[in-house]
Image (tube, helix red, strand yellow):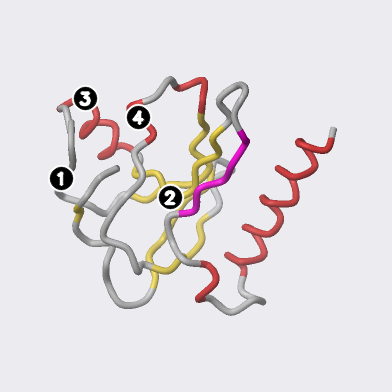
Amino acid sequence: MVQDCDNHGIYGTHEIETIEGEKYQITSTHHQMQCPYKIKKSYYDIYAWANRCTYYHGDNMSESIVKKLKEKEPEIVIYHKPLTPRCIAIQGHPEMMRKDCDTVKMLNNLINTELNKIKK
């Protein structure tokens, strides 16, 4: 985990981009950030990311990890390590957004897609 980063714990929202190239606004009520780059790439997929920070602080923040964070700051990550629960980690707080906004609709669709994968 990145213990401290800038330009995220701000009032309002900030932009994220999905793997499909779509852009959404998500709440920016955090000053910490998940960092999947310390585990095998085959155990996760970054579904959406931002590019806002100028610094990252946390345990074991190597130069290579900071370089990856500068390329893609993980906002929505799907973790799928074998023999562990499949999960979606969402950096922002969509529960604080209007239920009818595009971001919440996208997240609900993503959750339903992932649930359908588990059911198969």
Q: Are marks 1 and 3 in contact (CB under 8 Å)?
A: no
Q: Determine the secondary structure under disc 1.
A: strand
**What residue is at 51 percent from the left and 20 percent from the top?**
42
Q: Return the disc, 4 or 3, that comes first in the chain's sequence.
A: 4
Badge 2 element: strand
Disc with the residue nearer the chain's start (1 vs 4)? 4
SS state under label 4: helix
Q: Amino acid at mark 1?
A: His
Instruction: Answer with mark 2 or mark 4, whichever residue precedes in sequence.
Output: 4
Amino acid at the residue labelled 4: Tyr
Numbered badge on residue 64: 3
The numbered mark, 3 or 2, whose residue comes first in the sequence reads 3
Residue at image point 36% right, 45% down: 34
Q: CA distance from mark 1 to mark 4?
A: 14 Å
Q: Are marks 1 and 2 in contact (CB under 8 Å)?
A: no
User: Could you tell whether 29 is left or right of 4 in the image?
Assistant: right
Residue 39 located left or right of residue 53 = right
Dot 2: few (<14), some (14–19), or many (≥20) neighbours within 10 Å?
A: many
Is 87 in the magenta? yes
- Give the residues in magenta: 85-90
* Callout 4 touching callout 3 (CB < 8 Å): yes
The quadrant of the rendering that contains the N terminus is top left
When the figure is inspected, residue 96 is found, relative to residue 103, above or below; the finding is: below
Q: CA distance from mark 4 to mark 3?
A: 9 Å
Residue where numbered disc 4 is placed: 37
Q: Secondary structure at mark 3?
A: helix
Which label sits on residue 57? 1
Residue 19 lies in quadrant: top right
The residue at which mark 2 appears reads as 75
